[in-house]
Image (cartoon, rainbow, N blue to C red):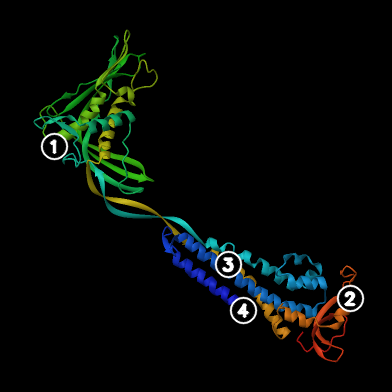
Amino acid sequence: MLVFLFIGLILSLVHHFYCCHLHHKPANGSSTIAGNVVSDQKKALFIITTIVLLVKLAVGLSISKAYDQHLWFSVRRTALTLDGLDALFSILGDPSAFLNRDMVTRAKVATILAFLTWTSSIAVLPVPGSLTVHPLQTRSIQTVSVPNIDLRATPSTGEIFLRTPILSYNGPAPVTQTVANKALIEGSIATLQSPCGQNCSYNLTFFAPSFKCTPPTGSRVEARIPSWEAGPTVKGDDVDTLNIKWISDFQSNFQSVTNCTSYNSTYTLNVAFEDNKQQIDIRDVSSGSPFGTNQTLFPDDSTFRPALAAIKDAVSNGLIGSVFQNMQTGLNVDRTLVLYSLLANNTDPTNPTFSTDTPRLIEEMLRNASVSVMTKSLWSTSAMTEVQTQTNVFVYSPRVLWAGYGSCIGVALPAIVIGMYALWCNGGGGTRVFSLIMSTTRNPALDDVAMEAQDVSGRYTEEPRFKYGRLMDRDGRVRLAFSEEDEKIGHDSWRN
């Protein structure tokens, strides 16, 4: 009894220390066993399940051994019918024996011990749940090479502007125009592939062009005029200005006017990725000095005006043009892409009008286009990046483990105390082996009882009760055996 309980306790401690070893260890690894790749989670599950089964077996055996001792303790003190004895001797292997009324009412403690043997394993059911796998978020600061905008440097791949034969500026390159058109039509910043993993963030500061548009002014017009009319850009040595006229409501026939001036600005933004989903927050756009592109621009310009002009002109190219509803020929669209942008009201596609918030939207378009150039990875820089890493780790809960094992061992302890007391009272260990059963049933009187109590079918017509103790046979010899309850039993020298 005690040996099996001690083994169960040792295995419980082995389980505890094994889980302590795994606590907060990565759970995504694997190892090769006998040529097979086995994940760390499967390996841990196998080891834990084996330990739990061994603990359950050890504790169950300790209680069953206590039951064996109390079985012989009970039959010495309580007379039972043959059915009751059958149930008492078979109950650890046949749960239907619990239905025997004689055993349950006359051998209550033995019945309880048998019930504990069957149910003690229930206490360990929560134990495997003491070790679980959880995602662990870790944050670290790393230096990562990230896309950037550096208009002062030559791009690592391609150019953002075209050149004339004398190498001067000759308008935006196709890649720049494509980025600007997409920003104008979609009204958002292009998608950037994360350079730092699924979850990370970093800050950037760079120079790029921006618009400052005047608040809208205008007047009522009587004649039929274009609902949108922009440009061309008025270029100067020190400043470029784009003049835009639009109508927001044909009912009022009010034409609004704004003038957008180009500036060399400092952009400050935060780039973040959450599960690879981009979030770019333009935190500040500080306008520096305006710039003009009237003179011939060369790439070695110290104010990097060719690069500024490329992004600004790409956006202006999408705005410049006109939209006019001709009574004879219908809708005439000249060059501009504004009908496909957020600037256009979608109330009447055949007679379009444009947003009252046009100045703000134009400023936003150039900001989005400037930042979107970064997505082409033409330049890069090293940035201090906060990287969030999610790793699956083992998490051990000692309370769950010891709640299960403690309940199991706590149930076994009183059972073992009862078994030890029975062992002391019996004067020796008792088992349910055949040799012991054979020696305790060698009583000729039992043969007579069996013959008299059975009918022709072999069933007992009477319910005699039997008790175990010291019996004096016909030759005067005293030995241990079963006998009828009222049969004369010799002096019993065992402790009662």
Sequence-wise first label, 4 or 2: 4
Instruction: Tell me whether the residue at label 2 lies in contact with that at label 3, contact meaning CB atoms closer than 8 angstroms.
Output: no
Choose mark 4 or mark 2, whichever is in front: 2
Q: Is residue 306 visible?
A: yes
Q: Which residue is mark 2?
A: 451
Q: Residue furthest bottom?
A: 476
Q: In the image, residue 311 lies at what x, y percent?
A: 22, 32
Sequence-wise first label, 2 or 1: 1
Q: Which residue is mark 3?
A: 53
Amino acid type at circle 4 is Leu
Choose mark 1 or mark 4, whichever is in front: 4
Amino acid type at circle 1 is Thr
Q: In the image, residue 257 lies at what x, y percent?
A: 26, 20
Q: Quick one: label 4, few (<14), some, or many (20+) residues within 10 Å? A: some
- The dot on residue 2 is 4
Sequence-wise first label, 2 or 3: 3
Q: In the image, residue 2 lies at what x, y percent?
A: 61, 79
Q: Secondary structure at mark 1?
A: loop
